[in-house]
Amino acid sequence: MRIAVIDESAGRAAVIAEGLNAAGLTDNVVITERSGLLARLEGLAPEVVLINLENPSRDVLEEYFTVSRALAKPIAMFVDQSNEEATAAAIDAGVSAYIVDGLSKSRIKPILDLAVRRFQAFSKLQRELHEAKSALADRAVIDRAKTILMARRGIDEPGAYALLRSHAMRTNRRIADVAEAIVTAENLLGDHP
Amino acid sequence: MTLDRIRIGFLPLVDAALPILARELGFAEAEGIEIEPVRDMTWATVRDRLLYGHSDAAHLIAPLAIATTLGRGRPPAPLSVPFVLGLNGNAITLAPALADALNPDGGLAEPRAAGKRLVEMVRARNAEGRRIRLGVVHRYSSHNYMLRYWLAECGVRPDEDVDIVTVSPPFAADALAAGEVDGICVGEPWNSVAVDRGVGKILLVTAQVWRRGVEKVLAMRTERLEDSRDLVHRLIRALHAAAAHFIEPESVEKNAAILARPEYVDGSAILIRRAISDRILLANDTEPVHVPDFMFQYRQGANFPWVSQAAWLYSQLVRWDRIPFSEADAAKALRVFRPDVYRAALKGTGAPLPGASSKLEGAIASEIGAGSTQGRLLLGPDRFFDGRHFDPDDIGGYLEALPG
């Protein structure tokens, strides 16, 4: 069974393909380019197409499935009424699936479940990466604010941190936000070049 | 006061203006609503988010609301349209050489004259084995129906003589530039983007094909609409107020600046300002010209969901999907448009409310007064370019008389 994975995020597409390979579905092809998409699909003649929900080619793809005479069997969106729940889960995860007519449900379900799990895992990874990045940025700005306070107030590092923390608590803000304000003020008002 | 949140899906187009302005200028807040816009790049995704509850309502191409209800291309899911977000606002933009060939004098073309030249051009191109290829934004779009209406009436068979392909609005100018298509029928600002880049010239605007053609609608799942009627009524009042504001000449500058922002259309405020003030640059070496009723978002009951509009859209769906006319489908299609909800929402406000829910489309030659249950309603010219009338009670007869 040939599966096409269409995603402009090469990273996510790789994560999906890896999952398919691990499940023994090795006849899969990843397409990340928007140009020439239809010609490639025509050559591949996939039985299942997985595409990320936000992909800008979805309308073009749906029209192709509607009119193409190149594909032996018509492909339609995976929204068999009896599979509403699976479709909803897929849409929630950010993936839509198109399946060739006549493919049995028992063969489709595991693919869709796998895609959903992989999409969710990818989102989680991205979120964690984003959080890690902003934690790093927070630490840098807090360090900078401490240095400013130490120089301006003539206090030591624990004293500078205590000052930041108490001000944050009093004003109900994050320490990083207070630090950011200090750094901004220093850049605007400070006597540095 | 806590605000009720409504998520509204939209595509980056000028005619997504009303929900955006309702949010940005306080019309929603005045009704106790916070609109959360959900931006997407394809109609398929706007539709799916609506059907699976990622959004509560959507800025949608009107024919797609009907096709989704009838289950064209997917299992049926009933949608309701309680408010029309605007009429027309689209154009047919061709590669400069083709535009010049069809319209040697420049300016806005005359639909019949340009169509006559197109017939010749199609014949010549097909003899050379180079079929003319035209892009529309979706199979179930008024762009597709308007383009095909014009082609067919001029003697070009849309499915046999040319290729009509799907191009999403944000990529329409690129497709023209790359030579993937010879022309596009798309909404603003994407025609103007093509003109600005020198890769296209505007031949016709869709208002020339049908002066009062229904374009984008506010669509909701019928179940969702019925479950929250009070909220829907408040949303309609907010959108109606936004529409009244939208057409004020003195607000054009500010509205264009809002729409141009990255989270909305993400485009040039200059191009957007031209579109919303009906001043269109047809070719990049010319001056903008005034195109009356290019976009029509408020006056003359423009936001009223006329059942006869739904009927016309259904007639075109039957015509171009080449399926038999069915009384049962027609009834379902007609019920998508909900004048009852519109009336209930605006009762007691100053908005004119038509007495009838359906009208003979294309029959008004000059401005006339129309029966209303509230306010004074005027209806302006609504002609189709071929002079045909559409009687919603005789869809079958209408279809028989149209060229295949």
Image (cartoon, rainbow, N blue to C red):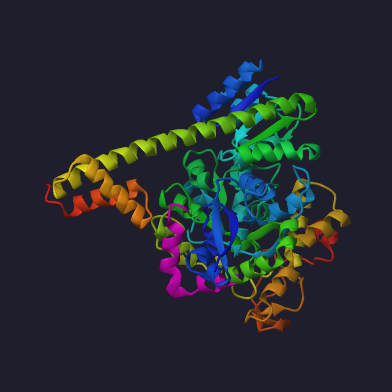
Query: Is-magenta flag for residue B261?
Result: yes
Is residue A16 visible to us here? yes
**How far from the left and from the top, in percent, is residue B117?**
59, 52
Direction from residue B329 to residue B177 in the image, left or right: left
Quarter occupied by residue B272:
bottom left
Q: Residue furthest right?
A: B327
- Residue drawn at 49 percent across, 65 percent down: B276
Direction from residue B192 to residue A114 in the image, left or right: right
**How far from the left and from the top, in percent, is residue B255?**
45, 66
**How far from the left and from the top, in percent, is residue B95?**
50, 46
Q: Is residue B343 above or below residue B85?
A: below
Residue nearest the viewer, comparing B193 with B27: B27
- What span is in magenta? B240-263
- In which quadrant is the N terminus of chain B drawn? bottom right
- Residue drawn at 62 percent across, 16 percent down: A22
**How far from the left and from the top, in percent, is residue B91?**
55, 56
Query: Is-magenta flag for residue B180?
Result: no
Quarter occupied by residue A113:
top right
Quarter occupied by residue B398:
bottom right
Direction from residue B188 to residue A1 in the image, left or right: right
Is residue A8 visible to us here? no
> Is most of the magenta stretch helix, strand or loop?
helix
Residue nearest the viewer, comparing B260 with B349: B349
- Residue drawn at 23 percent across, 45 percent down: A160
Q: Is residue A18 above or below residue B294?
A: above
